[in-house]
Amino acid sequence: MTPDRPILVALGANLPSRFGGPMDTLRAALAALSERGVAVAACSAFYRTPPWPPGSDQPDYVNAVARVTTALGPVELLACLHSVEADFGRVRSVANAARPLDLDLVAHGAVVMDGNVVVPHPRLADRAFVLLPLRDVAPDWVDPRTGRALPDLLAALPRADVESCERLSDAPAGLVKAP
């Protein structure tokens, strides 16, 4: 993968899991990915972000983005992410429900897919809670679908969305945060 075409996974949690609170859950999820052949090359800082949609009566989220390496293709990687979510207690019910763990395939190199699996993630350009942590691990990333660079995507976000994301920490111990 070239630096602007990495494999990227977004992580989020706003409910406790058997591993503890959301930050502990994200750390455990990173370890679980590594145990399943998805090597975490870098992880962003953790960010506290308001729930989606705005005004919903849920706890805030903790979000991050990991740059990973794996032999899995997009379909297999997404299945792996869903399996990890289930192991952490995620039950898919209604859209945007609170959850102990959410893992999204943001991008898989230069792959563009439509259908049952959509890559890059179809709503990433609208999500400060993905784009800000993404900047920590892949500042030169370019959306292979649109050709738009990450700085342009960030500049297009509403200022209030960006300002609502609070950086909580540096990268988790043992993980580099820059490419």
Image (cartoon, rainbow, N blue to C red):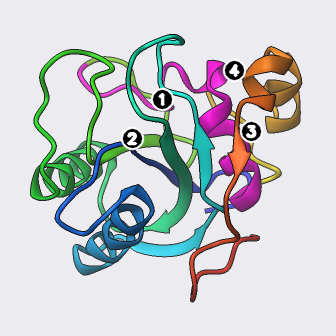
The three-letter amino acid code for the residue at tag 4 is: Thr
Question: Reading the chain from its start, which is encountered first: label 2 or label 1?
Answer: 2
Instruction: Give the crowd class for mark 1: few <14, some 14-19, many >=20 residues within 10 Å.
Output: many
The three-letter amino acid code for the residue at tag 2 is: Asp
> Which residue is at a point 63% across and 50% down the rendered structure image?
47
| Above or below for 134 versus 127 | below
Marking on residue 104: 2
Marks 2 and 1, how far apart at CA: 8 Å
Left or right: 106 in relation to 75: right
The three-letter amino acid code for the residue at tag 3 is: Val
Of labels 1 and 3, the one closer to you: 1
Q: Is residue 120 magenta?
A: yes
Of labels 2 and 1, the one closer to you: 2
> Which residue is at a point 17% across and 57% down the rendered structure image?
88
| Rendered image quadrant of residue 91 | top left
Marks 1 and 3, how far apart at CA: 13 Å
Marks 2 and 4, how far apart at CA: 19 Å
SS type, badge 4: loop
Question: Reading the chain from its start, which is encountered first: label 2 or label 4?
Answer: 2
Mark 1, residue position: 121
> Which residue is at a point 41% across and 42% down the rendered structure image?
105
| Rendered image quadrant of residue 15 | top left
Residue at the extreme bottom of the image, as rendered: 174
Which residue range is magenta in the image?
Answer: 116-138
Marking on residue 146: 4
SS type, badge 1: loop
